[in-house]
Amino acid sequence: MRFHEFYIGQVFRTKTLTLSKEDITRFAGEFDPQYMHLDEEKAAQGRFNGIIASGIQTLAVSFKLWVETGSYGDEVIAGTAMNNIKFMRPVYPGDELYTMVEVTGAEEKRNGTGLVTVLLSTFTSADNQVFEGELSVLVK
């Protein structure tokens, strides 16, 4: 979509993605090697009673699901900001996630481009919210 096709209040729903234990441990092993993501025994004794996904992985999955809607298409120029990132609940192996995306800002820039700000809100299939964050991108 081109910049002028986005409007404040516009809402999109993504497809779903299920994170397996292997997905969680593979990501954590490379990008967030903490016990609650990698060590089943120690994680079982911790606050969350088992392995959970990294918040960074949850953010990345939320972004992936949004991008895969194709709404930006080839019109995206670059991301410019991420703000107000919140991890609200843990994501466990087997959780099926989807993201609701609401356009919260559309600011025209020069040369026919615009800054689109969206609020990404990610939920489990049981509709428990696990993530929220704002993303701004420059679009043709």
Image (cartoon, rainbow, N blue to C red):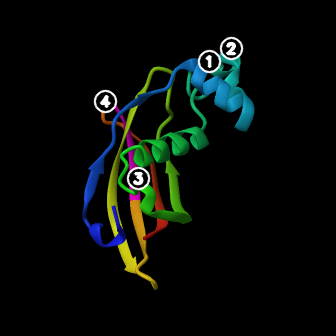
- Span highlighted in magenta in the image: 119-124
- Amino acid type indicated by mark 2: Glu
CA separation in Å, label 4 and label 2: 26 Å
Asked if residue 128 can be seen in this view, the reply is yes
Q: CA distance from mark 3 to mark 1?
A: 30 Å
Of pointers 4 and 2, the one earlier in the residue sequence = 2
Residue 7 spot, x, y in % from top left:
27, 69
Q: Are marks 2 and 3 in contact (CB under 8 Å)?
A: no
Q: Secondary structure at mark 4?
A: loop
Asked if the residue under mark 1 is in contact with the one under mark 4, i.e. CB atoms within 8 Å, the reply is no
Q: Is residue 32 visible?
A: no
Q: Residue at 46% across / 44% down in the picture?
A: 62
**Position of residue 86 measured from the top left corner of the image (x, y, whole percent):** 50, 52
Determine which residue is flagged by label 3.
120
Q: Nearer the viewer, residue 109 or 63?
A: 109
Q: Residue type at mark 1: give it.
A: Ala
Q: Earlier in the sequence, mark 4 or mark 1?
A: 1
Give the alpha-carbon distance from disc 4 to disc 1, as whole Å: 22 Å
The image quarter in which residue 55 lies = top right
Q: Residues within 10 Å of mark 4 (few under 14, many from 20)?
A: few
Per the rendering, the mark at residue 126 is: 4
Residue designated by label 2:
41
Q: Quadrant of the N terminus?
A: bottom left
Earlier in the chain: of badge 2 and badge 3, it is 2
Does residue 127 sit above or below 5 in this rendering?
A: above
**Number of the front mark, 3 or 1:** 3
